[in-house]
Amino acid sequence: MNREQQLAEAFVGLADTLATDVDPVVLLDRLAHHCVEIIGADAVGIMMATLRGDLRTMAVTGDGERGELFRTQEEEGPSLDCYRGSRPVGVPDLAELSHTWPRWTALALRDGYRAAYALPLRVNRQTIGAVNLLLTTPGGLPSEDLRLAQALADVAALALIHWSPDPARPTDIHTRVQAAIAVNAAVEMATGMLAEYGNLNPAQARLALRAYASRTGGRPTDGAQALVSRAIAPEAFIAALD
């Protein structure tokens, strides 16, 4: 299996929250192993924040499983800085940054790690934790691999938010499918209304829906349904194109 196939299966596996054998622990464990097998990290620790803002270790893989190295990041280290700053943290050579996290860096070097990254685990721009990637050689990871790791983390975080402890019934799935069809029908109707009102082609009409949603902070489907129900006049969508 090549890397493209691995990535495709990884994204599907992380997004499949309706499977009966999936729960938050399984999702985070999958994410950790994908970061090792596909991204190339030597060890991975995934942290999530409590309501108090404290980090807790949720999943680990590689050397020193559930050891002191990951627990220490609940007090200092790249994951804590990543979570608090809502931004990636990268250290290609830990030996050159020992003063920033003295206790954690000493433990990492002791365990044979020479580089570290922390990527935000986030949903809708809200950071809920961090993914810590450790490497046994200095130099770090290519930017492309870091972007892939961030994408995997984003999918996993979104899946966590949509996971339900109650298994989905066949009727639930059919209901969601029918809801999607109904929403699409509203979008198609709204597109036609805008095209006729503003003398637009279909692509321009859909662009008007997205532009209005961007301006108001809503969703295109909400705007479409409001237009179809006459709650919002078409002029508002046309004006959003300016």
Image (cartoon, rainbow, N blue to C red):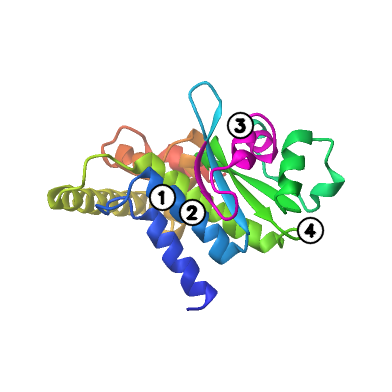
User: In the image, which disc is placed on residue 27?
Assistant: 1
User: Who comes first in sequence, dot 3 or dot 2?
Assistant: 2
Q: Are marks 3 and 2 in contact (CB under 8 Å)?
A: no
Q: Position of residue 102 (x, y in %)?
A: 79, 35
Q: Position of residue 4 (x, y in %)?
A: 51, 73
Identify which residue is drawn at 76% across, 53% down. Answer: 114
> Which residue position holds label 2?
31
State the CA–CA distance, disc 3 to disc 4. Answer: 24 Å
Q: Position of residue 194 (x, y in %)?
A: 38, 49
Q: Are marks 2 and 1 in contact (CB under 8 Å)?
A: yes
> Which residue position holds label 3?
74
Residue range corresponding to the magenta coloring: 57-83
Whether residue 23 is visible to the viewer of this picture, yes or no, is yes
Task: Give the foreground label among 4 and 2.
Answer: 4
User: In the image, which disc is placed on residue 174?
Assistant: none
User: In the image, which disc is placed on residue 138?
Assistant: 4
Task: Give the foreground label among 3 and 1.
Answer: 3
State the CA–CA distance, disc 4 to disc 2. Answer: 23 Å
Identify which residue is drawn at 16% across, 53% down. Answer: 174
